[in-house]
Amino acid sequence: MQLADKVVVVTGGGNGIGQQIVLALLAKDAIVAAADINSTALDATWTAAGAQASRLSLHTGDISSRESVQQLATTVVEQHGQVDAIVNNAGVIHPFASFHRLDDAAIDRVLNVNLHGTIHMIRAFMPLLLARPEAHIVNVSSMGGLFAFPKQTLYGASKAAVKLLSEGLYAELRRSNIGVSVVYPGAVKTNISHNCDAHPEKMEKFERFHPGISPAKVARRIVRAMEKNQFRVVIGLDSRFLGLLYRLLPTTTIRMMGRLIQLVMPD
């Protein structure tokens, strides 16, 4: 789709990949509604947008709340008159820990934001998207949604669910006006790991082991996928290589990942 003058809603727009998606869309002359639970982070996005901020609106809310998402849809239409695309980018991880060591709050949070938040967004905005001549849905999954990532088991489960949700939507909407993209970034240099209540020393060790690619690069690929109506978007050498290895040798890949994570982050 051509992005100029299109209204695009981006969740998690206050930092990391989300902020870079907002900036990349503004560079394409899109009108962007950036949503985030953190109003201070949204202010930083506004500042980063500079002269392009005239085409940017900021919306504070919690995508894990159905009511908050419905209000977001209402507010965006009131301000911009339409919605042409949504980018479901907001996501969290849980502490790096084995499944049996996670508490209920950590499990609920990762599922409510990553999976239920994506569902709430699609349900709230689908009628608006169907009303447009051309529209698009982007769901950000993860390398961890392609194969098991030990000590991020529930995060991986939430992102695998986003993968299957996206595939089902793609099949259902194939002959409609709505394009669907599902994105599988590898490790990315963002602060998502610092929002999971994990031990800082563990996070620093993991990030030294695997620093990741820049959020700006991920954002550029996502915007290109929207323009070209590309369904499956795998970003990063790690995501491509490990995804291929898993398809060829699933058991071996899972065991290898288990050994690597245990080496870097022992219990």
Image (cartoon, grey):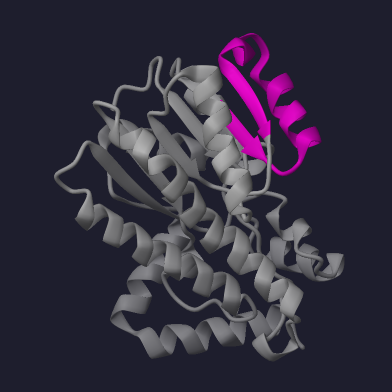
Residue plotted at (46% across, 44% down): 124
Residue 250: image quadrant is bottom left
Residue 170 within the magenta-colored segment of the rendering: no
Q: In this view, does 38 lie above or below 251?
A: above
Which quadrant holds the N terminus? top left
Magenta span of residues: 33-59
Quick one: 232 or 79, which is closer to the camera? 79
Where is residue 209 shown, x and y percent of the image?
67, 66
Where is residue 117 shown, x and y percent of the image?
55, 55
Where is residue 26 shown, x and y percent of the image?
51, 20
Residue 17: image quadrant is top right
Left or right position of 181 against 193: left
Quick one: 104 or 247, which is closer to the camera? 104
Residue 216: image quadrant is top right
Which quadrant holds the C terminus? bottom right
Where is residue 45 shown, x and y percent of the image?
69, 28
Total numbered badges shown on the rendered structure: 0
Q: Is residue 157 above or below residue 8?
A: below
Left or right position of 184 against 129: right
Q: Can residue 215 be seen in this view?
A: no
Of helix, strand and loop, which mostly describes the magenta segment? helix
Residue plotted at (33% across, 70% down): 244
Q: Is residue 161 visible?
A: yes
Q: Is residue 1 above or below residue 50?
A: below
